[in-house]
Image (cartoon, rainbow, N blue to C red):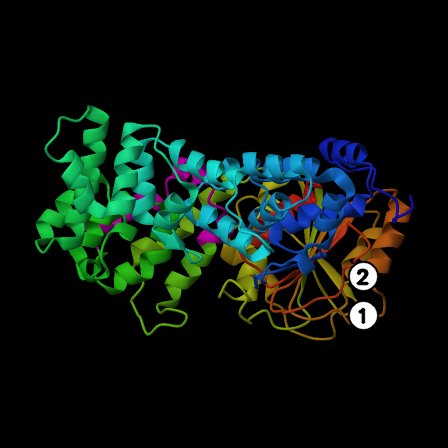
């Protein structure tokens, strides 16, 4: 099969879309890559770059080609399916569509606003992108005013109250700005209370609602907003703790001065999301909130090991590994904060990592994961602050235990050696196999050549390296030769764990991808790439 031709293995949905657009495959892939990680190129970098028209030329060509409505539909579908690893590219793309000369494209983009902007931060970001893109007359036309007003009116009062008190302003915009500019008129009594709070403050709410007979729903919103205001002014620790527990207030609603209290943190811990908890384990240990042998430590350990909870919030093992490695280090990356890692928490994190592997869904692809051991893997991975051997070992373990057909190998100059990875092996055992005596130069074509010589059928090659490729053969050319021999559109991912740039992937070949650094978003990028999403 000609490697330059459209792959026969594209997903049915992907192929249908390409056919319906009547466009080249590269245009669709470029759009999806931009929506996924903010670049139309075959390179994902852990360092997020500013978005602009120059970074979305493929998007512009599709819109200018009278396919704006289909582009909006793709933006919406891509996000509803959870494929975007970064939210801002889709918001930028939607803002671009909303400025298009075609009336149907503008209308479609405004209708999609409520699906993409699920948080105030996303709404503020979208509005800011529109401001940056708008040329000439003002941007607050009737359609945008109605869409912003509908965003507020589509929520129930309690949800809106929690939302606006947790995130008051972002990207140069506030809720007060948006209500004023959209001429928003509440369609629900509970929403009206929140709007009054936004525009007139707590004093304005009291003047209207304190002495009148309110419905049960309105009274709940009133009491909640009252609790938020009391928490700001509260000087009694026990009263604040009571407010937190009774109204389930979150860290963002508590003053920084109150967060110096261990008891306040303990109250917040009870409802703290797992992702936030993992992020703050070091600080909580340093501040003695989590004291060795305490009931609080026991409760935290139970939560982070809860397999059903991990699955519910879709916590990938790599996220837990990063939290674990950072906690074990005993100090912050940049701050002066230090702590003595608690043994029970360390064990719980190790257990959580193992249990979370079972929550990862297999892609059903045939993988060959190759780790370059021609140089030391002790360097810090860009984007994750953990060692490159830890990042490589974690991905080897996860892929080996979740994919039914996966092989792990290590390679150095002129040599490829299979690694035996069984379901009962631990992370440390995998890491030990990857710590080899450095020697020779890096040749990222070796694993592909080895697969060809040993008649291995591989859908996805993933190569982890600390170096730029410098072998005798170009990996891109070697992959194309392998494809012709096997008769399969195999894909190649090269992960430069400490690289700020890579140039292995052929930019004209949609079956190749470079990853610079490695973080939790790179995990999702790999999955999207394997499943022919990008």
Q: Is any part of residue 191 visible from this angle? A: yes
- Where residue 313 sits, quadrant-wise, is top left
Q: Residue at x 19, y 43 (%)?
A: 204
Q: CA distance from mark 1 to mark 2?
A: 9 Å
Disc 1 and disc 2 in contact, CB within 8 angstroms:
yes
Most extreme residue toward the top, as rendered?
215
Q: Is any part of residue 460 visible from this angle? A: no
- Residue 238 lies, in percent from the top left, at 9, 49
Q: Is residue 67 left or right of residue 422?
A: right
- Residue 183 lies, in percent from the top left, at 40, 40
Q: Report the residue marked by disc 2.
A: 475
Which region of the structure is painted magenta? 293-320
Quick one: SS at disc 1?
loop
Q: Report the residue marked by disc 1.
A: 471
Q: Residue at x 56, y 65 (%)?
A: 388
Q: Is residue 283 magenta?
A: no
- Residue 322 lies, in percent from the top left, at 46, 58
């Amino acid at each position: 099969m000609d490697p330059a031709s459209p792959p026969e293995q594209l997903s049915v949905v992907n192929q249908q879309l390409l056919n319906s657009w009547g466009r080249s495959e590269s245009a669709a892939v470029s759009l999806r890559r931009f929506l996924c990680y903010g670049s139309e190129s075959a390179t994902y970098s852990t360092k997020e770059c500013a978005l602009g028209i120059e970074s979305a030329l493929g998007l512009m060509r599709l819109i200018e080609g009278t396919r704006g409505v289909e582009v909006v539909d793709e933006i919406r579908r891509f996000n509803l399916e959870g494929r975007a690893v970064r939210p801002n590219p889709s918001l930028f793309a939607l803002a671009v569509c909303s400025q298009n000369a075609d009336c149907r494209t503008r209308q479609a983009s405004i209708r999609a606003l409520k699906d993409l902007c699920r948080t105030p931060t996303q709404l503020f970001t979208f509005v800011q992108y529109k401001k940056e893109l708008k040329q000439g007359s003002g941007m607050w036309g009737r359609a945008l005013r109605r869409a912003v007003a509908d965003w507020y009116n589509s929520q129930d009062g309690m949800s809106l109250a929690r939302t606006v008190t947790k995130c008051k302003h972002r990207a140069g915009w506030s809720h007060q700005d948006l209500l004023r500019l959209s001429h928003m008129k509440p369609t629900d009594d509970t929403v009206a209370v929140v709007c009054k709070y936004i525009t007139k403050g707590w004093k304005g709410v009291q003047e209207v609602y304190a002495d009148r007979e309110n419905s049960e729903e309105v009274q709940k919103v009133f009491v909640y907003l009252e609790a938020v205001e009391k928490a700001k002014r509260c000087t009694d620790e026990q009263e604040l703790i009571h407010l937190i527990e009774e109204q389930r207030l979150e860290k963002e609603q508590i003053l920084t001065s109150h967060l110096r209290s261990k008891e306040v943190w303990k109250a917040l811990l009870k409802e703290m999301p797992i992702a936030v908890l993992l992020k703050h384990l070091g600080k909580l240990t340093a501040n003695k909130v989590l004291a060795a042998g305490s009931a609080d430590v026991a409760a935290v350990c139970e939560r982070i090991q809860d397999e059903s909870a991990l699955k519910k919030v879709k916590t990938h093992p790599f996220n837990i590994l990063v939290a674990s490695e950072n906690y074990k280090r005993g100090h912050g990356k940049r701050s002066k904060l230090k702590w003595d890692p608690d043994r029970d928490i360390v064990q719980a994190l190790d257990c959580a990592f193992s249990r979370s592997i079972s929550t990862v869904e297999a892609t059903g692809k045939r993988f060959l994961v190759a780790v370059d051991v021609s140089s030391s893997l002790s360097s810090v991975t860009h984007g994750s602050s953990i060692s490159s051997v830890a990042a490589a070992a974690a991905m080897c373990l996860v892929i080996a235990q979740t994919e039914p057909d996966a092989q792990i190998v290590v390679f150095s100059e002129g040599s490829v050696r299979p690694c035996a990875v069984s379901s009962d092996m631990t992370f440390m055992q995998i890491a030990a196999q990857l710590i080899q005596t450095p020697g020779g130069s890096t040749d990222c074509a070796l694993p592909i050549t080895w697969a060809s010589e040993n008649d291995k059928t591989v859908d996805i090659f993933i190569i982890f390296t600390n170096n730029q490729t410098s072998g005798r053969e170009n990996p891109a050319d070697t992959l194309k030769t392998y494809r012709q021999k096997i008769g399969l559109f195999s894909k190649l991912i090269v992960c430069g764990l400490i690289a700020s740039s890579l140039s292995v992937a052929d930019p004209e070949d949609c079956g190749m991808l470079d990853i610079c650094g490695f973080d939790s978003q790179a995990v999702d990028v790999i999955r999207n790439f394997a499943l022919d999403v990008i």
